[in-house]
Amino acid sequence: MYRSRPNRRRWHPERREGAPRSHCASCRTSPFPNPILVRCELKYLPAAAGAAPFPSVTRSPVLIVGLPTVTDHQGDPGLDPDDLAATLRVLEQLPQLPAAHPDIETVKRASQRMFNRVRKARRAAARQEREQPLRQADEEVLARTATGSPMRIDDETRGILLEASAPGEAAGLLHFDRGCYVCHAKYRQVDAFYHWLCPECAAFSHGKRDQHVDLRGKRALLTGGRAKIGMYIALMLLRDGAELTITTRFPRDAVRRFRAMPDADDWIERLTVVGIDLRDPSHVAALADEVAAGGALDILINNAAQTVRRSAGSYSHLVRAEDAPRPAGVALPRMVTFDRMSDAHPAQLVGSLGADAVAHHQDRDEHHEAAALAAQASAHVLRAGSASLEAYLAGTAVDAGGLLPDLATDNSWTNTVDQVDPLELLEVQLCNSVAPFVLVSRLRPAMRAAVHAGARRAYVVNVSAMEGQFGRRYKGAGHPHTNMAKAALNMLTRTSAQEMFDSDRILMTAVDTGWITDERPHDQKLRIAGEGWHAPLDLVDGAARVYDPIVQGESGIDLHGVFLKDFKPHPW
């Protein structure tokens, strides 16, 4: 460890017992055994442990701790040889001048910047070397948490909850302060589950993950309920007693996922799975009519969204699975499909929007064949093309949504306005903002009926994101089309929530799920994960944020017309 002395022309490091003293006459501290760097009048000499004191100051090569050596910059152009030779000649002539000569003062001022850089680099290198073991120890503490574990599978939705390897409620203490993801306060005690939350926010989040409310007798519609956050929202609703309808483009995969839950027999008969493409407004309108025909609706959660368009090959695993038979010999949810699906990358999306979409119920014998054909149609329009499953599985894994990793080095999450495909722009607006609008509009009478039938409140939860917020001081240039869609969803909430509450006692909110996923291209995600980065929250945390306005409403706390972040109202 090095430190400066008041006399800036004399410098030495910390000293310890048993080493020779420096030759510098101004040094007054005790001797020390380590190799040292002695500075006197801009001259540097190394002194090895056990060596005799230096007899005198000589002109030796400069040794600067913390700066690169000459060999580190062999490829750099460097100074012009003639200029360097001239500089050395000037420096050799300086000792011949009187000490008070103005030229010496001029050279001293000119060289001061270089020596300031020397000191700064040397101190930074020493500090980095000194702190490295401590930072490594901090990384080991974070790795013992559930969310910071190197073994964490982001977006895991097989129902396997994250677990911490650290015993007890805390993973350990950090040597350096860390900023809390939620409240931004500095903390050092690390929760056993959360690696990026302070103890207070971690305790609060634990409570929110486990909260329940009695929803027996209530009907709910959840879009995008097959995987990731949607699946965990669905499980919360079902386990609290709701009769639930979910939507997905891959209904058979959804059936298999929910059937695999260990407690599926407790609620599977209250689940309906609808195969639908929300990018087709005619399907969305037909879905609303189908749900309304079933009676009063208590809860509508607009969760489905297209964030990044995947390559066709990413869907190959799901497409093939849609042709497989459903599990046999066990109770299964009711499955409804529509008679035609839009293409995953439609060449003429507008032309594919039909006027008369028809729902088909698999539990009715006369419609069984039509429903099966519809499921197959869904598979065909999502064909993998030339991509093969085996090629992608070599060294990679199917993600939580059942998609194969998209190996493209860029995607629409990093695209600027001139790079976004206009067709993807249209897809995103249809799925992320138009579909929610149509559902809210068409299902409002059914939700009004729920309140008139005795429900305290009805609920609309629009799953939004910070990307749609206008109040942020900085807004990056990437994915402007998804920002637009989330901003539109926020404006729907901001515009209509108060009127819907005043007229029908419907509570409509917009909710940010928190940072739970990384949408960057696959190669970037792998690199960042290899460096130890993980999102601060998991899928259950995201689902808990969406579920919370319903829990609060049933307990008598009305939240409406607000944008909720981390369970609290946040600026739009």
Image (cartoon, rainbow, N blue to C red):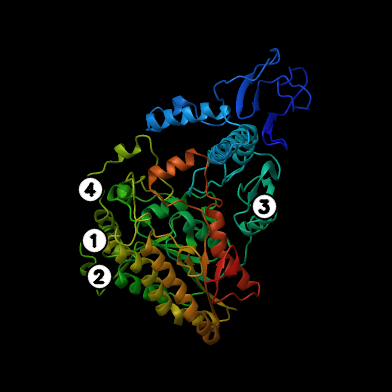
Instruction: Tell me residue 456's x, y (percent).
Output: 60, 79
| Dot 4 or dot 3, earlier in sequence | 3
Picture quadrant of residue 129: top right
**Residue that numbered label 2 is attached to:** 353
Pointer 3 or 2: first along the chain: 3
Q: Residue drawn at (45%, 28%), measured in percent from left and top?
A: 72
Q: Amino acid at mark 1?
A: Pro
Q: Which mark is residue 385?
A: 4
Residue 221 placement, left or right of 137:
left
Tag 4: amino acid: Gly
Front residue (pair 274, 74): 74
User: Is label 2 in a helix, a strand or a loop?
Assistant: loop
Q: Tag on residue 36?
A: none
N-terminal of the pair, mark 4 or mark 1, is 1
Frontmost of labels 3 and 2 is 3
Nearest to N terminus: mark 2 or mark 1: 1
> Mark 3 vs mark 1: which is more N-terminal?
3
User: From the viewer's perspective, is the residue at label 2 or at label 1 nearer?
Assistant: 1
Between marks 2 and 1, how big is the CA–CA gap? 11 Å
- Residue at label 3? 186
Q: Secondary structure at mark 3?
A: strand
Q: Position of residue 345 (x, y in %)?
A: 26, 58
Q: 90 or 50, which lies in front? A: 90
Categorize mark 2 by other alpha carbons within 10 Å: few (<14), some (14-19), many (20+).
Answer: some
Task: Give the mark, 2 or 4, whose residue is nearer the N terminus.
Answer: 2
Secondary element under disc 1, as helix, strand or loop, is: loop
Instruction: Quote the CA–CA distance across marks 4 and 1.
Output: 14 Å
Q: In this figure, which residue is indicated by the disc labeled 1?
A: 346
